Amino acid sequence: MLALRTPPDPESLAASVSDQDRSAVAKALNLLDDKRPEARKLAARLLATLPKERLYGSGHLIGLTGPPGAGKSSLTAALVRVWRNRGLAVGILAVDPSSPISGGALLGDRLRMLSSDLDDKVFIRSLACRGEFGGLSAEVWPMSLVMLAAFDIVLVETVGVGQKEIDVSKLTDTTCFVAQPASGDSIQFLKAGIMEIPHVLVVNKADVGLAARKTLSELRGTLKPPAHAGDWQVPALAASATKGTGIEALADSIEAHRAWLTAQGMLPTIRKRFQAEWIVKRLLEEFGRFGIETLGGESRLLDSLVEIPGSPFEQYESLRNRFLTNRGQ
C-alpha cells in the first residue's frame, strides 16, 4: 500500500482550517475522504484537534432536501448570496448521485456554475452519496465538523432521493424541505414520514403562480400546531430562486430556528446526538444488529456517546476494537 506522499500535520491543519484557509479546508476534506489506514489515523487526530466550541456550539448546520427537480441547487445559490450580503462565510457540502463506474459525483460542478459570481468566503465541496441509504455519504458528518470549524453557515444539499432521504434530518441543526409546484410527491413524502417534520418548508418556483399557491396551501395543511407553548412553529413559505423573491424571508426563518435552538439550550446536545447516531450507524453497517447488541444495545450506546463525546473517528475505532476484542478477533 502506498504511503501518503506528504502527510499533513493534523494540528497545523486544524489551526489553518479555523483561520478559514480555503486550501487547508480542502486538504482536510481530502484527508477525511482517504480510506487508507495511515490517513485515517491522521484524520482522527485532525478531528480531535478542531476547537470543540465551534463544532458543538457555534455556526449553523443546515440541511436542504426535497425531491429531484425542486430546484435545490438554484435555491442554494440564492441563499448563499443573501448570507454573503449579511457578512457570513458559507461552506457547502453538495451530495451528488454516484457514478456507477467511478463512484464519484456526477454533478460536481453544478453549484460552481450557479454561483460563479460568489467570492472567496464561499467554499463548495461536492461528494458522491455512493449508494448510501438515506441519501447522504458516510463522510458528511466528519466533513461537516471541518466546515463548522471554518464557516458561519454550513449547508448540506442532498441528492434528492425521495422517501429514502431521511439522514439529513439527523445530521443538521435546521432541515429545510423544498417542494416544487404541482408535485403531489412533496406532500406524500411528508405524509409518509420522509423525516420528522422539517423545521422550514418552502415552495420554490413561486413565480409559476396558481400551482405554487396550491402546493403551499397543501403543505400548510400538513402542519400540526406545536404540542407545547414555546415549541417551534414550522413556517411554510414561498420563494423563487429565479426571480430572487422570498429568499430573504427564507433565510430569516432558517436563522430564527437557529435562534430558537440556542434559546432552548439544545444546540450542543443535538450535535452530540448527531455524532452518536453517525457512529452507531457505521457500527451497524459493519457488524449488524448483533454487533450493536454485543456493545450494549443501541439506546445505551447512543446515551453513552452523547454523555462522553469525543472525536467521531476515535469513538468509532474504540467501539469497533471493543467488539472485535469481545469476539476474540
Image: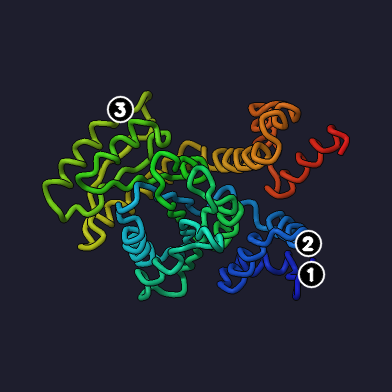
Residue 54 appearing in the image: no
As measured in the structure, the alpha-carbon distance from the residue carrying label 2 to the one carrying label 1 is 8 Å
Label 1 element class: loop
Residue type beneath disc 3:
Pro
In the visual, does 283 lie left or right of 2? Answer: left
Q: Which amino acid is tagged 1?
A: Ala
Please tell me which residue is depicted at 44% across the width and 49% down the height of the picture.
63
Read off the residue under disc 2. Answer: 38
Q: Are marks 3 and 2 in contact (CB under 8 Å)?
A: no
> Residue 231's x, y, as percent?
39, 31
Q: What residue does disc 3 label?
A: 225
Vertical order, 23 against 80 (above or below): below
Q: Residues within 10 Å of mark 2 (few under 14, many from 20)?
A: few
Q: Are marks 2 and 1 in contact (CB under 8 Å)?
A: yes
* Residue 208 image-quadrant placement: bottom left
Question: What's the CA distance linking mark 3 and mark 1?
Answer: 56 Å
Q: Earlier in the sequence, mark 3 or mark 1?
A: 1
- Say which element carries label 2: helix
Q: Is residue 187 visible?
A: yes
Q: Quadrant of residue 214?
A: top left
Q: Nearer the viewer, residue 168 or 253?
A: 168
Q: Earlier in the sequence, mark 2 or mark 1?
A: 1
The residue at the far right in this view is 328
Label 2 sits on what residue type? Glu
Point out residue 307 in the picture as x, y percentages from the top left corner.
68, 35
Residue marked by disc 1:
3
Q: Tell me if 270 is positioned left or right of 309 in this view.
A: left
Residue 166, placed above or below residue 5:
above
Q: Position of residue 89 (x, y in %)?
A: 46, 65
Is the residue marked by circle 3 packed among few (<14), some (14-19), or many (20+) residues within 10 Å? few
| Foreground disc of the pair 3, 2 | 2
